[in-house]
Image (tube, helix red, strand yellow):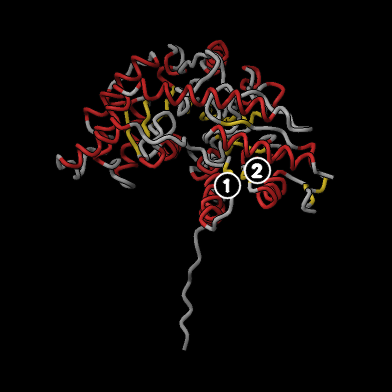
Amino acid sequence: MTTMIDHRVSKRANAISPSSTLAITARVRAMKAEGRDIIGFGAGEPDFNTPDPICEAAIAALRSGMTRYVPVPGTPEARQSIVAKLARDNNITCTAEQIVISNGGKFSLYLALQSIINPGDEVVLPTPAWVSYKPMVELAGGTIVEVPTTAASGFLASPEDFARAITPRTRAVILNSPSNPCGTMYDPEAIRAICDVLAPHERVTLLSDEIYERLVYGGREHLSPGSLPSMQERTITFNGLSKAFAATGWRVGYVCAPPVIAKAMSKLQSQMTSSVTSFTLPALAIALNTCDGEVEVMRLAFEKRAALMEQLVSQWPGVTCPPPMGAFYVFPDISSTFNRTSPGGRVIDCAGAFAESLLEETGVAVVPGDDFLGCGPNHIRLSFALADAAIEDGCGRTARWLGGLA
């Protein structure tokens, strides 16, 4: 007699799609392992190694026996190093009690949303936006209210756009500048104007995702909303080691939040992951306090690649793309290719079909824009976190392929 085992999963798990960006990265890795010649524009991670001082700090912590539990929000020393960093670099005044260190910036965002969102709450989000914001809001019981932007506006929402989106049910606004996937950013004047709109709405918390704050180009200036008096007590600032310090696999993120929210996040984390990996905490302090030179070397390389990417993508027939201002992405509009046939005989009817055909026929991997919300279905995302030669090769293959569309 066979016993039937009930392997049903929750509605919650069934309702959430896997991350498309991570799926593309995994597929590229598998194809390369098969020996295929693949140019991967999909991965949202630097191609540099984590700077040596950061690695050495973690190794020293391990050798000193720092392998046991630490306080849930991080050691006092690590949290104080973040307080000092925020004061020095962001003009944000806070205390260590407002800092929570978590297992990556993504988990920091998840914890914050779980801490402030109740079923029925609305979260205002300019789109196109990073693929994980919407699922995380929905897992907390909230609803996304999109503020659509276009390439013509540089994918930037106006203060008036935010004003129209806010309702009595609005609990939070998410702002990601510089942006994933768009590579554009709000200048200080725009940040101030948006905060002027949000300030009268006392129930609204601003979630400022600043993971790309160090990667800005063309002499642009990054302004943290949490530094503005009108929003200082209502802003949660997110950051981490992943992007600027080339430490995606370390999984170290942190927030500066109002004390009540920081306490709630710490309480939730205590029942989920306990603390971040203990021996990464001295490395975090070293990164924030001593690695400006190493970060600048990487930033300059990305700035050069941003210019190269803009130059090459602008030559693609029928494709339009705002120039990258920060992060390491471009988000070109490829809708002019829809309802055409690829050189390999595939019909291009959406961004997904574009990406699949391009990968199979040229070995160039990009991320289709569908999961980025807003006008994403007309776009693809390319990361320029790869060597100049690979950028030139991949863009050249794509240009030739586009030239062969029927």
Q: What residue is drawn where x is 34% and y is 31%?
A: 51
Quarter holding residue 406: top right
Element assignment for label 2: strand
Crowding at mark 1 (Cα within 10 Å: few <14, some 14-19, many 20+)? some
Q: Position of residue 31 (x, y in %)?
A: 56, 54
**Can the viewer see residue 16?**
no
Q: Do tag 1 and tag 2 residues touch (Cβ < 8 Å)?
A: yes
| Residue sticking out furthest to the left | 64
Q: Position of residue 302 (x, y in %)?
A: 51, 26
Q: What residue is drawn where x is 48% and y is 68%?
A: 7
Q: Is residue 252 left or right of residue 77?
A: right
So how many labels did they put on this image? Answer: 2
Q: Is residue 22 above or below residue 126?
A: below
**Can the viewer see residue 347?**
yes
Q: Which residue is mark 2?
A: 368
Q: Amino acid at mark 1?
A: Ser
Q: Tell me how far mark 1 sits from mark 2, CA to CA.
A: 8 Å
In terms of sequence position, does the residue under pointer 1 or pointer 2 come before the other?
Answer: 1
Quarter holding residue 287: top left
Q: Amino acid at mark 2?
A: Pro
Q: Which residue is mark 1?
A: 20
Crowding at mark 2 (Cα within 10 Å: few <14, some 14-19, many 20+)? many
Q: Position of residue 163 (x, y in %)?
A: 62, 20
Q: Is residue 15 above or below residue 291?
A: below
